[in-house]
Image (cartoon, rainbow, N blue to C red):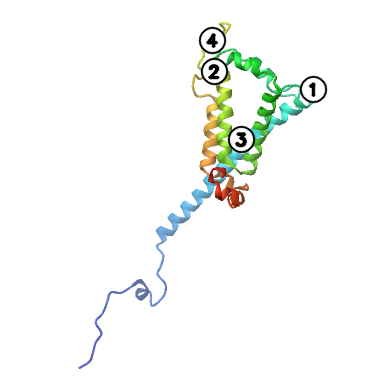
Amino acid sequence: MALHQRPGPRTDRDLTNGSAPVPDPGTSAAARQAAAGSAALARTAATARLLTALTFLWAFGDKTFGWGYATPSGKGWIDGGSPTRGFLSGVSAGPLEEVCHSWAGAAWADWLFMLGLLGIGVALASGVALRATAVAGTLMMALMWAAEWPPARHLSDGAPSMSTNPLVDYHVLYAALLTVLAVACAGRTWGLGRWWERQPVVRRNRWLR
């Protein structure tokens, strides 16, 4: 009597004559599509990061050197002008009106404002410390929003405020964008984000990422 081994369930390797399992074309296509979408999203976030960095760095440069746009030539910080006097002294609505007037032109206010613009711009351009940058940028935008006080329909002299939105203006949008860039780890693409995250001090303090 011939002995026959009881057949067991055939595997993918049996079905392909001992070769490796054949990948599912649909799964591979979906994986490639997901990877391409992730890469496109990373590049989009990096582009938004660099454009936002340029916005802050341009404001710093114009206020420092007086490039003739928002700051007239010869009126820059380097020429003895005050980056905060014009804005803060012009506040004419809201609960911080008197406080802003008292801060206008103060040396400490000038330094804090300019260092904030420079620090946020450099961090965004390099792609490092985006979480701390989002916190600092949101605080700056919140103070500027409160100074302009968009909810006011009229200024303190009774003139129309010309506010375009009582709640969500460009300060709120900038704060939201900074938060999104930090959450998306936008510094990893076209930036030093990955290198920054490997630093020992950053590994020990994740809030520095």
Q: Position of residue 54 (x, y in %)?
A: 66, 35
Query: What's the distance in space between the residues labelled 4 and 2, CA to CA?
Result: 10 Å
Q: Is residue 88 above or below residue 173?
A: above
3 and 2 marks in contact (CB < 8 Å): no
Q: Nearer the viewer, residue 167 or 92?
A: 92
Disc 4 residue crowd, few under 14, some 14–19, many 20+, Cα 10 Å: some
Ranked by sequence position, the earlier of labels 4 and 3 is 3
Residue type indicated by callout 2: Trp
For marks 4 and 2 on the same chain, the one whose residue lies earlier in the sequence: 2
Q: Which residue is mark 4?
A: 154
Distance from the alpha carbon under mark 1 to that under mark 2: 30 Å
Relative depth, front residue between 49 and 138: 138
- Cα–Cα span, label 3 and label 2: 23 Å
Q: Are marks 1 and 2 in contact (CB under 8 Å)?
A: no
Q: Are marks 4 and 2 in contact (CB under 8 Å)?
A: no
**How far across and down, in percent of the image, does residue 45 sit?**
55, 42
Kindly identify which residue carries mark 2. Answer: 149
Q: Which residue is mark 1?
A: 74
Helix, strand or loop at label 3? It is helix
Name the residue tied to disc 3: 52
Q: Position of residue 143 (x, y in %)?
A: 57, 24
Q: Quadrant of the N terminus?
A: bottom left
Q: Mark 3: few, some, or many residues within 10 Å (few <14, many ≥20)?
A: many
Q: CA distance from mark 1 to mark 3?
A: 26 Å
First in sequence: mark 4 or mark 1? 1
Secondary-structure class at tag 2: loop
Front position among marks 1 and 2: 2
Indicate the amino acid at tag 1. Answer: Gly
| First-in-chain label (3 vs 2) | 3
